[in-house]
Image (cartoon, rainbow, N blue to C red):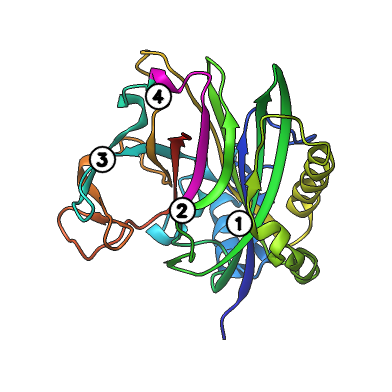
Amino acid sequence: MNKVVLIFFVFSIGASSYAEEVKVIGAMRPMEAAMKLEQIGEVTQARKIRNLTKNKVAPESLSALGFFDKKSETWKSTNHVIGFISQGGAAQPRDLIDATSVVADQSLQDQTIKITLDRLRVFAYPGGGLHTILFDFYGRHMAGGASEDLHFSQTYRALEGEGAGVSGYPIFVGLKLGKETLGLRIRTVNVKNENDEKFLSFLDSDTFKSGLQLINATNPLTPVLTKFATGITESVAKRNQNVAVQDIDLGMDFSTIGTRPKLSQGSYIAIQTPVQNWDWTKWKFFPDSGQVLSNDDKKQPIPYNYIIFSISRMQ
């Protein structure tokens, strides 16, 4: 019988609006992480952590413990790598490069863009089984010379080891850029609390499935939606049996500084992996299947959690 778990996925744009930070499991102290894992039924994992830290001076975080018995346990990592998918023909395999190597598209300054969710890969999360994904989007919209904070949520479902049934889903339509940086905040929370799952089921309504349509003037309803969605994020992430897994802060700009991800039109990929010296040349994106596969074995999908989102200028 499959375990049913709920993943709380947060995609943020702009500065964080959360009153308090919620640690991802990889950033928790080992004993704190062990307690969380016991709450969601990962008793064997919790026991291994307790044994490794018994009568020892444990590191500050589970991730620093280096406890990765197999690739399916990489949800313990706090590390993410950010890449960019090269352009090409409709069915042509695409190369992947580091997002810091992208040439910034200067024509996007002061323009209006669309951001879509193109792929959500759920390789492994603690608990396993069927995952219901709740996306919460936070952003800052520049309209009429003023800025406006925005927040919106949506749900999807995916089995462990598979992708959610989503492609090109609008995250923001009509987001106005400035001349500097586009900041992204991505967070996932694994939710197993049954009451939370029932409470969040209302996000399957047509209102939330319609996406967030931004306009060039301030929408008086937006502050209400923002506070409402932020409240869900803070409440669910702190509840027993719920645990944050991924947390990414990403800023893309128009500079030529080598250590910064660049802002351009195209598709970006964020991969959760403990590998520090990531080699992008070992992988390609195959449009016909919508998957990232190994260069050596075209049938081997990338063994990590990842998301692909794209940015395009609106006409």
Q: Which residue is mark 3?
A: 87
Whether residue 137 appears in this view of the structure is yes
Question: Residues in magenta?
Answer: 106-119
Looking at the picture, tell me which residue is in the foreground, 11 or 204: 204
Helix, strand or loop under label 2: loop
Q: CA distance from mark 4 to mark 2?
A: 21 Å
Residue 262 numbered tag: 4
* Residue 228 magenta-highlighted: no
Residue 298 at x, y percent in the picture: 19, 61
- Tell me which label, 4 or 1, sits earlier in the chain: 1
Mark 4–mark 3 contact, CB under 8 Å?
no
Amino acid of disc 4 = Lys
- Tell me which label, 3 or 2, sits earlier in the chain: 3
Quadrant of image for the N terminus: bottom right
- Tell me which label, 4 or 3, sits earlier in the chain: 3
Amino acid of disc 1 = Arg
Looking at the picture, tell me which residue is in the foreground, 175 or 234: 175
Q: Which residue is mark 1?
A: 50
* Residue 112 magenta-highlighted: yes
Indicate whether 135 appears above or below 157. above
Q: CA distance from mark 4 to mark 3?
A: 16 Å
Amino acid of disc 2 = Gly
Identity of the residue drawn at 43% across and 67% down: 162
Q: Can you tell which of label 1 and label 3 is closer to the viewer?
A: 3
Whether residue 55 appears in this view of the structure is no
| Label 3 neighbour load within 10 Å: few <14, some 14-19, many 20+ | some
- Tell me which label, 4 or 2, sits earlier in the chain: 2
Q: CA distance from mark 1 to mark 3?
A: 47 Å
Q: Can you tell which of label 4 and label 3 is closer to the viewer?
A: 3
Residue 168 numbered tag: 2
